[in-house]
Amino acid sequence: TMAALYIALRAAVHIEMPIKHFCRSARPIDFAPMVQPMIQTPDHSSFPSGHAIEVFAAATVFARLVTGLGPKEAMTNADNDGRMGTLAFKLALRIASNRSVAGVHFPIDSASGAVIGCALGEALYRIACGDDDFPDVVNVSFDLVPEADPPFDLTLPWLRSMLPDDAPGHLEPSDDTIFGKLWDDADSEWNEI
């Protein structure tokens, strides 16, 4: 399980950094000297949040291993599996949101990172199962809110509404690849519990 999560995190870093270098988005402190970040502000782009990509990819992989549910279903189901899967996404939401609270990200950074992370986690699951039908393209919408309303913030219901459909059913890991074998071993760990 730890090896599968490690691979998800390493894949996230390899995906997020080129996107950040391409976007070159300024950090909150670059817009106003009144912003006093609680932690050191990284030098690279604010958009998208790398922490959000990483934790939502890990949450998706974890939910798949523990419950068999994809991210959309894990955040929707009210049964025991759904509640267990949702815990990983609640933790990921907390980590991503705290980056905005700390003053180093905007909520839109975390929201886009969450979508990318969930798509990455689903893609890794499909790779492990030998399914080459990857997640659909996602068009993310950040609707403007009236002046009197609170500004946009990342929430799990918003994220669920942005995600494409989960991979169908419970696919079986493929022993034809190293990652498929690793996923099968991790899946076995949870079946023993």
Image (tube, helix red, strand yellow):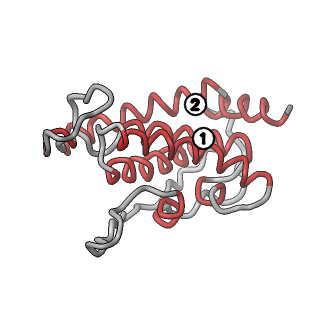
Q: Quadrant of residue 173?
A: top right
Name the amino acid type tagged 1.
Answer: Val
Q: Is residue 76 above or below residue 13?
A: below
In the rendering, which numbered label is found on residue 5?
Answer: 2
Q: How many marks?
A: 2
Determine the residue located farthest toward the right in the rendered image: 192
Question: Is 5 positioned to the left or the right of 155 in the image?
Answer: right
Q: Give SS at disc 1.
A: helix
Residue at (55, 37) in percent of width and height: 58
Q: Is residue 36 above or below residue 69?
A: above
* Residue 14 point in image, percent of width and height: 36, 32
Q: Give SS at disc 2.
A: helix
Whether tag 2 and tag 1 are in contact, CB under 8 A, the answer is yes
* Residue 48 point in image, percent of width and height: 31, 45
* Residue 74 point in image, percent of width and height: 66, 55
Question: Is 24 positioned to the left or the right of 134 in the image?
Answer: left
The N terminus, quarter of image = top right
Sequence-first disc among 2 and 1:
2
Task: Work out whether residue 153 or residue 192 is closer to the camera in this orientation and state it.
Answer: 153
Label 1 Cα crowd, 10 Å radius (few <14 / some 14-19 / many 20+): many
* Residue 106 point in image, percent of width and height: 30, 48
The C terminus, quarter of image = top right
Name the amino acid type tagged 2.
Answer: Leu
Residue at (42, 40) in percent of width and height: 98
Question: Is 102 positioned to the left or the right of 158 in the image?
Answer: left
Task: Work out whether residue 21 or residue 80 is closer to the camera in this orientation and state it.
Answer: 80
In the rendering, which numbered label is found on residue 61?
Answer: 1
Residue at (21, 40) in percent of width and height: 35
Q: Quadrant of residue 39?
A: top left
Q: Quadrant of residue 65?
A: top right
